[in-house]
C-alpha cells in the first residue's frame, strides 16, 4: 500500500534490457520491406512502440524514417509503464556505447552528440518521438496505427492477458497495419483475431 514501495517493485520487475537497433535483422526487414510498402500507401505513418524502456526502439524507428522519407512528419508514440525509463528516453539519453553499438556509423555521427563518453540523441530526432507513461493492461489505446511494435514485452504475461492485449492491438491498427512481436513470442490465435502472418 506504500506508493514508493510499489514503484520500487515495478522497477524491479520490468525488463530494462534495451539498445538501439536491437536485433538488427528485424530493423533490416522493416527498412527493406515493411516501411517501403506502408510509405507507398501513406507518406505519413503512425507508429506505436510499446514497452519502449529508455527509447532505443522508437528512436531507431525515427532514424530509419529520417533516411527513408526525410521530409515527412511521422508520428511515433513511445510508451512504458516505468516513469524513470520514460524520463531518460524523453531527454534523449545519456546512452552508453554498448546501447548504440548497432547504430550505423553515419547515423551515429549525424544524429548523436557525445559528452564524457556517453551519447545523446539530437534534438531533431528526439522531437520526432512522443513519450508517455502507459499501462498496457489498464490504460486506453489510441488507434489508427500503421505499425505497433510490442517486442519482448508480453513474455511474462499470462496467456489470457496476452490474448486480450493482441485483440486490442488489432483494433488499434489501420486496415493493413502491422503488429511486430518478439522472436521468442507467439500469437497462436492470430488467424482467429484477423491477423495475417507476414513471410520473412
Image (spheres, helix red, strand yellow):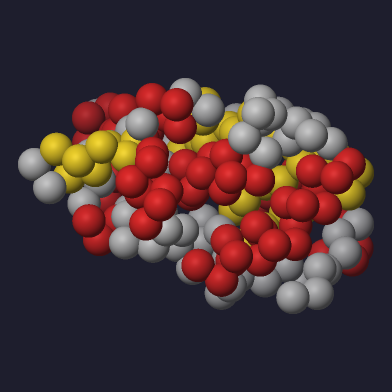
Q: Is residue 191 above or below residue 35?
A: below
Q: Position of residue 124 (x, y in %)?
A: 45, 26
Position of the C terminus, as image quadrant, is bottom right
Q: Is residue 168 or residue 180 the one in the foreground?
A: 180
Pick the residue in front: 149 or 169.
149
Image quarter where the N terminus lies is top left
Q: Is residue 174 left or right of residue 158?
A: right
Q: In this picture, is 185 found above or below 116?
A: below
Q: Is residue 68 left or right of residue 20?
A: right
Instruction: State whether residue 102 is above or below residue 1.
Output: below
Residue at 88% in and 49% down? 176
Image point 57% across, 39% down: which residue?
66
Q: Residue at x 47, y 42 (%)?
A: 59
Res 70 visible: yes
Total marks drawn?
0
Q: Residue furthest left?
A: 116
* Residue 9, x across and y down, in percent: 28, 45
Residue 31 in the image: state x and y as whole percent: 65, 57
Residue 98 position within the rendered picture, expressed as x and y whole percent measured from the top left: 25, 61
Res. 164 in view: no
Relative vertical location of residue 91 with respect to residue 82 in this rendering, above or below = above
Residue 25 falls in image quadrant: bottom right
Q: Which sits in the foreground, 66 or 155? A: 66
The residue sitting at 62% across, 35% down in the picture is: 70
Q: Which of the 4 quarters of the picture holds residue 87?
A: top left
Amino acid at each position: 500500500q506504500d506508493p514508493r514501495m510499489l514503484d520500487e517493485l515495478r522497477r524491479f520487475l520490468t525488463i530494462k534490457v534495451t539498445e538501439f537497433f536491437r536485433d538488427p535483422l528485424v530493423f533490416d526487414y522493416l527498412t527493406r520491406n515493411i516501411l517501403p510498402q506502408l510509405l507507398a500507401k501513406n507518406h505519413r505513418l503512425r507508429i506505436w512502440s510499446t514497452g519502449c524502456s529508455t527509447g532505443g526502439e522508437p528512436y531507431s524507428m525515427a532514424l530509419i524514417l529520417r533516411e527513408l522519407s526525410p521530409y515527412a512528419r511521422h508520428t511515433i508514440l513511445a510508451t512504458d509503464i516505468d516513469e524513470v525509463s520514460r524520463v531518460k528516453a524523453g531527454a534523449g539519453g545519456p546512452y552508453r556505447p554498448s546501447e548504440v553499438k548497432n547504430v550505423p556509423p553515419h547515423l551515429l555521427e549525424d544524429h548523436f552528440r557525445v559528452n564524457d563518453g556517453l551519447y545523446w540523441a539530437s534534438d531533431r530526432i528526439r522531437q520526432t518521438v512522443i513519450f508517455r507513461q502507459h499501462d498496457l493492461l489498464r490504460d486506453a489505446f489510441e488507434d489508427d496505427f500503421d505499425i505497433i511494435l510490442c517486442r519482448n514485452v508480453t513474455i511474462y504475461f499470462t496467456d489470457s492477458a496476452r490474448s486480450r492485449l493482441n485483440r486490442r492491438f488489432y483494433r488499434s491498427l489501420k486496415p493493413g497495419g502491422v503488429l511486430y512481436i518478439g522472436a521468442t513470442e507467439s500469437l497462436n490465435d492470430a488467424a482467429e483475431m484477423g491477423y495475417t502472418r507476414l513471410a520473412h
